[in-house]
Image (spheres, rainbow, N blue to C red):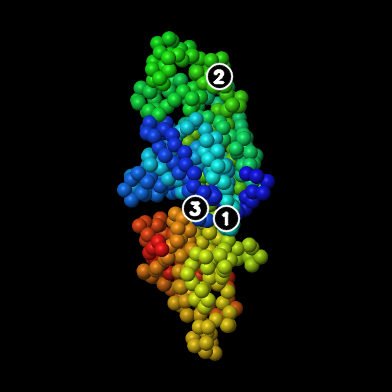
Amino acid sequence: MNANFNPDKQHTLKSAVSISGTGLHTGIKVDMILNPANAGFGIQFQRIDLAGQPIIKADCDLVTDTSRGTTLEDKGIKVSTVEHILAALVGMGIDNCLVELNGPEIPIIDGSSAPFVEIIEEAGILEQEATKLWYTIDSNITYYDEEKRVEMVAMPAIGYQITTLIDFNSSVLGTQHAGLKHLKDFKTEIAPCRTFSFLHELEMLLDNNLIKGGDINNAIVIVDRPVSEAEMERLGKAFGRKKMEVKSGGYLNNLELRFPNEPARHKLLDIIGDLALIGTPIKAHIIANRPGHSSNVNFAKKIKQHIKINKQMLDVPIYDPNQTPVYTTQQIEKTLPHRYPFLLVDKIIELTDTRIVGIKNVTFNEPFFVGHFPGNPIMPGVLQIEALAQTGGILAINALPPGEYDTYFVKMDNARFRLKVVPGDTMILKMELNAPIRRGMCEMQGTVYIGNKIATEATLMAQLVKR
């Protein structure tokens, strides 16, 4: 992040960029491409090696395994070891990215996020016109695992910062802590820090054939007990090395540590990657004692649920006319084919991968008032639905990979008109995805608010067609 980086705007990549490597646990060589994505797209993974090229959203509710990294799974399709690339994307301020893979696991490379940071910088970072909507934690959110003695807390803060402490009862590691006060320091202070393992864990993984892509240079191996010559010989064969040794400080045949507390810093890296699965950028101070992937994901779920509950309590969108819009009318016209007098959305004030809020200012000069209840002007209900449809079209298009699309609404259910919409009203148009977009079909729940009252609501289904 340079000095001109605006943390209150969404960002993507300027161009696609690729990297190849071996999956740590599967041993499968994988090519990975990071692609630019529209505002509100979020981070999603696509298995281009499988039929239909399925997409998996970076979402803590889709995590199915945390035993040796974080694995996402949706309808039987998996992507494993996602934490290091997620940390790199968050640490470099990338909000929207489609990660293409031709295999089941993210390449491990050197066990850190540094190689991913390098290719992100190679691609370049593009500021998007959409506003980045941070969720500010307003009260402590805590997580505790008595069995693992894990404690985590998210406290109110003006930015996003993390402090982590580790204690493995190891004479080599001792007790370590690491901190990150500003994401702008991620590249230099956290990204280079490699994953680590204890020798006894490594032997267990080898016994169970679980690190098929392991190499002695993509992890720090900690040796905190005497090792026999036979064990050294076995490790040498496993890693294709003629000679293995324990260097000073209790580290197996590894390079010098990049930081004295590199293990603690890598745990902090993992937290950044795993908490990216909340799906919403947060302003909070995270303090984590003895964290691991399982606790990180459980904590992410707890924070996500907190955000969901609080947003439901405050679910009426707040419209501030002084707020800089995510999209102006001119920017909306770049996405939708509609034009005056049939463009019924003036601006977009909120946009995520599942929700959008638009504004329509209703004036007496609207052409439909001429013939609809003359002398008692009321906006036709069908045009209120059309305004919702246009707003939802922007959401749906932005939720897809880059390209030009048209949306055709194919079904409407449960439409209700509770209030008259008349000249002088400001329509707040909210559309939310009911489920992920599948095969070009999407279903959304739409609501029109006038002030804090519901005027209109309906469930709409649309088909997206690439031009």
**Which numbered marker is on residue 128?**
1
C-alpha separation, residue under disc 2 versus residue under disc 3:
44 Å
Left or right? Give the position of 97 relative to 326.
left
Location of residue 5 in the rendering, given as x and y in whole percent from the top left corner: 64, 48
Left or right? Give the position of 338 relative to 212.
right
For image coordinates 42% across by 65% down, the residue present is 406
Res 274 visible: no
Q: Amino acid at mark 2?
A: Val
Q: Amino acid at mark 1?
A: Gln
* Crowd rating for badge 1 (residues with CA inside 10 Å; few <14, some 14–19, many 20+): some
Location of residue 19 in the rendering, given as x and y in whole percent from the top left corner: 47, 38
For label 3, the residue is 37
Give the foreground label among 1 and 2.
Answer: 1
For image coordinates 51% across by 62% down, the residue present is 356
For label 2, the residue is 172
Give the structural element (helix, strand or loop) at label 2.
Answer: loop
Question: In the displayed image of the protein, which residue is found farthest to the top?
Answer: 229
For image coordinates 58% across by 61% down, the residue present is 326
Q: Amino acid at mark 3?
A: Ala
Q: Nearer the viewer, residue 236 or 458?
A: 236
Mark 2 touches mark 3? (CB < 8 Å) = no
For image coordinates 49% across by 76% down, the residue present is 342
Give the structural element (helix, strand or loop) at label 3.
Answer: loop
